[in-house]
Structure formats: C-alpha cells, structure tokens
Amino acid sequence: MTVRELLRQGIQDLRDAQVQSPVLDAEVLLAHVLERSRTVLLATFDEQVSALMQREYREFVYRRVRREPVAYLVGDKEFYGRAFRVTPAVLIPRPETEILLERALEITGSDGMAVDVGTGSGCIAISFALERPGWKVYATDTSADALGIAGQNIAAFRAAGRVRLLHGSLLEPVDSQVGLVMANLPYVPTGEIRRLDADVRAWEPHCALDGGPDGMGSIRSLLEQLPAKLRPDGVCLLELDPRLFDALDRAVARHMSDWQVLRHRDLTGRERVAELRGFTPS
C-alpha cells in the first residue's frame, strides 16, 4: 500500500468518526510513524509503506478515533516555535497561551526573576527563559508527574541553568519576591468539564482544567498570595476564560483594591490575558 492509499484510508476513518480535523491528523500521524516531516510525506505519495508501518499507523488512527489527542500520540506539541514533550500528565499547550508569553516579553527588560505558576510541560517558563537569558525563572506545580515532564523539556532545551522547578502550590514554594508572575491556571467551572470536547475531557488532566464551581478557585488563591511574592513594581499575567474577567476585577478589588487590571485580546478578538499591576507604568 502506498502513502497516498494509506492516508486516504486514515482520513476516511477519522472523517467517519467525526474527528474535527481528519486530514491534518491523518497526515501528522503518518508522518510520525514514518519519521519524516509532513512536507516530505506529501512529496512521497507513491512510496510503498511496509506492512509493519501500516499496522502501526492503523493503531494510531484507531486511538485517534477514540479521541486520544494527536499531541499525546506523537508525544510533543509546538509552542512558540519549539516542540515540547507532552503526555497525559500535562495540559497540551494552546496557541492562545502564546499571547501571555508575548506580553511577558514585551514588558520585561534584560534581567530579573520570574515565576511560571502551574507550569505543566514547562512551555511558558522555558520559552521565556530562552527568550530572556538574563532572567532566572522558577516553575511551580503541585503535580510531581508534570514536573517530571517539565524537567525533560528543560533538559531537551538545555535550560537547566535558567529554569528551576519547585514542587508546591502556586507561589508557596517561592522564597523571594519576583518581578513577573505568569500563570495559566485551571479556569473551567467544574460543572462545565463534562461538556468539553472528548479530546479534552477524557484525556487531559482534570487538575489542570477544573477551576472550581465558578472557575476562579485557583485564581483567587493566587491573588491571596500575590502581594507577598510580587515586587511592588512587578506584573502578574494570567490567562483565563473571557467570561471570567469581570469576576477577576471583583476579586482583585477585594484583595488588592489599588491594583490595575489590563485586558489583552487573543487572535480571535476575545479577551484572554489579564495584566495585574500594583503601580502605574510611566
């Protein structure tokens, strides 16, 4: 069977199962099995595929039909131009999170100290550290398994001297004040998790999704810790659901009444990143 025939079969199986992006997924999975880029794959349509590789590919397609995410199947996901290792122990990086990172890079100078709270795969902490080599970056998480994956990514990108992993809740493991806090915390209301796409609901870690009854549980806890751990001239960047910005405003007013909350939109025009400041920039 040729690459073209195998792809056609995989696409049809995924389409029949109503997978959202059958063509892209089929191509990515076959490229992974054949250990080549999608560009090379699409240039070798008439190449014969061995029986062993055919069986491996069909197994991947079957798992995708069961809604196992492509990122978990191939073992990595691109974020800010770099491929990060991911497993079901960590949330799969999303493009909208790059908005948070881009804002962090816009507002920071050549050196300082930062924290990535709830680091997961470490994609935010590592990307920031690689783009800002003069900064020392802490990365915290309550999950030892997630920290294990983050550690593998730190090693892969040779960032061990720039990113330090800390096991614990939110800012609790950080023993000094920092100039920047970045956080993509759980913000899905508990009652809405069952309505998420099967790809997310059945496979991604609920501890990285479940934000409590109103989606604000972890965020409120972070706000309580923030004044003691963020420098007076520091900034906190939070990714959250667009529907939660008003609730965030109320929570900030309760905990830090003199702080500003700025809103940044994602590529779809939806409010996605909150910027918290205890001072007015000049």
Image (cartoon, helix red, strand yellow):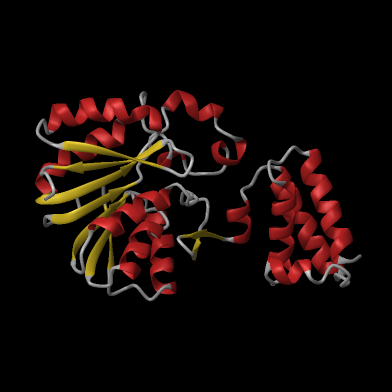
Where residue 36 sits in the image (x, y, percent)? 69, 72
Residue at 84%, 67% in the rendered image: 45
Residues 273 and 62: in front is: 273
Residue situated in front as seen by the camera: 154 or 82: 82
Residue 112 image point, x, y percent: 17, 64
Q: Is residue 264 left or right of residue 19?
A: left
Q: Which quadrant of the view contains residue 278?
A: top left
Q: How many marks?
A: 0
Q: Position of residue 222 (x, y in %)?
A: 23, 40
The correct choice, above or below, for 142 with respect to 262 in the image is below
Residue at the image point whose x is 9% and y is 34% from the top: 258
For residue 180, side relative to residue 15 (left or right) = left
Q: Is residue 171 visible?
A: no
Q: Residue at the right extreme?
A: 1
Q: Nearer the viewer, residue 61 or 5?
A: 5
Residue at left 38%, top 69%? 154
Looking at the image, which residue is at 43% across and 67% down? 153
- In the rendered structure, the answer to whether residue 232 lies left or right of residue 15 reads left
Is residue 57 visible from the viewing direction of this image? yes
Left-right relation of 10 to 164: right
User: Which x, y percent locates residue 163?
Assistant: 29, 67
Q: Quadrant of the N terminus?
A: bottom right
Look at the picture and state if 52 lies above or below 121. below
